[in-house]
Structures are given as structure tokens and as C-alpha cells.
Image (tube, rainbow, N blue to C red):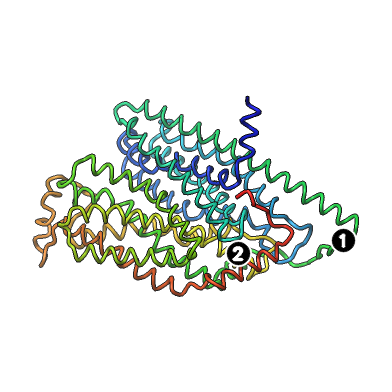
Amino acid sequence: MGKRVWSCCLGVSTAVLYGSLSLFVSILHNVFLLYYVDTFVSVYKIDKVSFWVGETVFLIWNSLNDPLFGWLSDRTFLSSHQSGSQISSPEVVLKRLQSLSRNGPLFALSFLAFWVAWAHPGLQFLICLCLYDGFLTLVDLNHNALLADLAVSANDRTRLNFHTSLFSALGSLSVFLSYSFWDKEDFMSFRLFCVVLAALSMIGFAVISRLLRRRFQNEVRSHKNEEELLKELSVGHAPHASTEKPVTLGEYLKQLSCHRNFLWFVSMNLVQVFHCHFNNNFFPLFLEHLLSDRISASTGSFLLGISYIAPHLNNLYFLTLCRRVGVYEVIRWLFILKLGLSIAMLLAGADQLYLLCLFIASNRVFTEGTCKLLNLVITDLVDEDFVRNRRQHAASALLFGMVALVTKPGQTFAPLIGTWLLCVYTGYDIFQRDPIKDSVAAVAVSGAESPVPLRQGCFYLLVFVPITCALLQLLVWSRFTLHGRRLQSIKALRQDAQHGHLIDVKAI
């Protein structure tokens, strides 16, 4: 029976196996995002100073670990000439899968460390955040890099991304299940729920990575047999003996600084990351002050839940559009749609209840959907970097890490700028919550020339932030040239350069 199940698993396509890895990340990460702050504040009673120290250290570590792990992973691929034997694509994929098989279970264990008090709350908060984010980064970098390494054609990559979105949507269901177990007074049931999730994630990483490794180990053996046969027959070109040193980190950064499409992309993506996290941070605030007195609690809970799962489902449709018109055009029209919906909401006003509910939900859904398409653009930048700098192999993980380094400050800017605008405009300080003061937020700024009610201030923040972001992104995105014929020529050049060493992913 066990052999029959294993043989059935071996017949599953590469795309499905690749996509299923995102399931074992999302079932844990969505629960982490929703509950880790509340757990330490309400259950473990962490003090304010320890909380902010932990968050500050976490923000620094969160920004630096992406390029650090990317460099450690891909530094051997940066030299433009070979100094020894050719590294084949299956060997690179196998290296990334070995990293996932090690770090995936460790990521699940680091998730468990949040839900049991084992040290002083401040120390535990700091250690747990850094450990969890470190293993999450290692998993994400290698999983994203596989998107560029497994396939070159746009159609194959959209299929891989399609399955990733599908399994991520399934993983979001853990958020709905978690409401049944979350209880601050009786924490044991929630702990057991997290143990079950972590066990599923560990088993999933172990099984799927083993299936994928077995598949590509055969590719590596086949490649080595071909090399040995060519040596015996003295067929083909002898490897170049190059005295050129490998590319240093400084030289790599200089190459990136001359990569204009990379610079335009990270500028646009910085605004996108800011907008995504602005929506995440202020979604509950908008529900509370714009809709709480006009909709039921169950409706608010439904809007919150659907905002988590809908972006993944919506992305399935966007990916089919990407196959027809290209990723560049889909992203451009999403920016135009964001601008159009925001202007329409501004003209309609804050009193249109159903339109307001639809806009609050759709604003987050379309913004998150755009974020999930950007990995496809990064893989195209990996191709262009490979061709421009004549690399021996694409430095996929490193480029993903460098994108994260430049764009992750948007996570910090979102709450800072949002709370500052709200405070300046309405006098409402989100960090000094008081029910009496909240109810008379407009009176608190009675000394101002034109006091603005808190509800009106939230509405203007809701519509003007996406309008500003959309205008900036449309301006920057118009300068991005890696699409159409240029993209096709870049992909053709990469396929020619790796001819004979490219992975055949017909199973996709």
C-alpha cells in the first residue's frame, strides 16, 4: 500500500510539487502574522520597551538577511568565466532543494517557539522573531529562486506561479480555522492547533523536497554520464582555464547599479510594498471607524477573512491574463484600475455603504494580487542579469535578496507615514488609545482652524494613499523596458547560453 502511494506521488507533475511547497509556508505564516503580537502583548504581558526593542532589531535583521543569505547561496555563480567544470541547471536546482529540505522543518520548529513561554517575554520575543524570520527567508529565497531556475519561458513560469497561488489560497484557510481555537484565557487549545499545523508543515517539506530531489538526482546523474562520455571521446570544447577572480560583492553591486530595469523595478516595488503593508496595518482601523457602526460584526469578520484568501484566488485569473498579454501589461492595468477605483470612491463619498465595503475589500485584494505577480518580473530580471553580465549561472536567490533589501523599508514607512498623516490631519494618536478621547477625536483638535472628524480623516487616508501610489507607480513603470520584444530576445539569449544544460520541464 505504501509503495503504491509513493509511486503515485512520483507521477505528480513538477509544477504541482513546486506549488505545494507554498502550502506548508502559508498555513504557518498567516497564523503567525495574525496572532504573534497579540500573544506577546495580551498573554505573555511583554513590556512596551522590550516590544519596541525587539521590533527594531527585527526590522534591521529582516532587511539584511535577504541579501546575506542570497549572497551565501549564489556567490559561486557570479563569475563570468568558468574556472572548472560546468555547473548544470539540475545541480543548481538540487542544491536549492537540499536547502529547502533542511530549512523547511526548522522553519516549522521556529514557528512553535512563539506559543510556549520559555524565557523572559522580551528575550523570547527577540529570539523567536529573528529565528523565525531567518528560516522563513531561507525558505522563501530558495523557493522563489526555483521559479527562475526550473523554467525560462513565460508560460512555464506562469504555470508554476499558478500552482503556488492555488496552494497559498488553501493555506489561508488556517486563518479561518484559527478563530475556533484562539482564546487568550485558555491558551492550550491554540497551542495544540499550532503543533498540528507545524507537524503538517514539517511532513510536507520532508516529503515534497524528497520527491523533487529524487527527480533531479536522475538529471544530475544523466548529465555527469554525458560529460564522462564526451571526455572519453574528446568531443566538444575543453573547459576554459580562466585566471579571472570571482565577482566580489562590491563588483556585483556596481553591476546592479548599472542595471536600469532593476532600478526602475525596485523603485516601483518599494511603493507597492508600502501600499500592501499600509492596507495590512490600517485595515482594522478603517473597518472600525468607517463601517463598525453600520455593519454587523460577522460582516466585518467576513471582509477581514476574504481579504486574506481572495488575493490568491484572484491571482489565478491574473496569471491566465499574463499568458495572453504579458506580465507588464497586467500590472500596468492593475495600477490604472487602482487609480480609477480610488477616484470613483473619492467622488462618491464616505456615505455610500456598499460601495465603501466593496472598495475597502477590493483595494486590499488588488494590491496584494499585484504583489504576487511581481515574482514573475524578478525572474525576468534574473534572465536579463544573466545575459548582461555573462554569468555561468543565473544568481536567482541573490537577486531576490537584493530586491528585498531595497523594498523592505516600505514595511517600516507604511505605519509611520500612515499614523503621522492621521495624527496631523485629525489629531488622533493611534498609540494613545482612550475610548473617551476616540469618541471626541474632532474636539481634541478644536484649536485648529478646520478640525476634521476622525471618520472623514480615515476616508481621505483610504482614498488618497492609493491615488498617490498609483500615480507614482504608473510614472515609474512606464520607464521599465523589459517586456515585449526585448524580453523575448533576453529569454532566447539565455536559452541559447544554457543549451544542453537547461532542465526539461515538460512535466509542467
The one of 224 and 272 positioned closer to us in this rendering: 224
Of 454 and 4, which appears nearest the observer? 4
In the rendered structure, find residue 430 and report the number of the disc placed on it.
none
User: Is the residue marked by circle 2 packed among few (<14), some (14-19), or many (20+) residues within 10 Å?
Assistant: many
Q: Is residue 132 left or right of residue 211?
A: left
Q: Residue at x 35, y 59 (%)?
A: 275
Q: Position of residue 378 (x, y in %)?
A: 53, 61
Q: Which residue is drawn at the image coordinates 30% and 31% (left, top)?
A: 184
Where residue 224 appears, as percent x and y from the top left, is 79, 50
Secondary structure, mark 2, is helix
- Judged from the image, the secondary structure of the residue bearing numbered disc 1 is loop
Q: Is residue 93 left or right of residue 83?
A: left
Q: Position of residue 39 (x, y in %)?
A: 34, 36
Report the amino acid beneath label 2.
Answer: Asp
Which quadrant would residue 177 be assigned to in this image?
Answer: top left
| On-image quarter of the N terminus | top right
Give the distance between the C-alpha atoms of the residues marked 2 and 1, in whole angstroms.
29 Å
> Who's the residue at 90% across and 54% down the image?
232
Circle 1 residue? 235
In the image, residue 359 sits, relative to residue 488, either above or below, namely above
- The residue mark sitting in front, 2 or 1, is 1
Image height of 294 relative to 40, above or below: below
- Left or right: residue 158 compared with residue 190: right
- Please, which residue is most extreme toward the front here? 324
Mark number, residue 383: 2
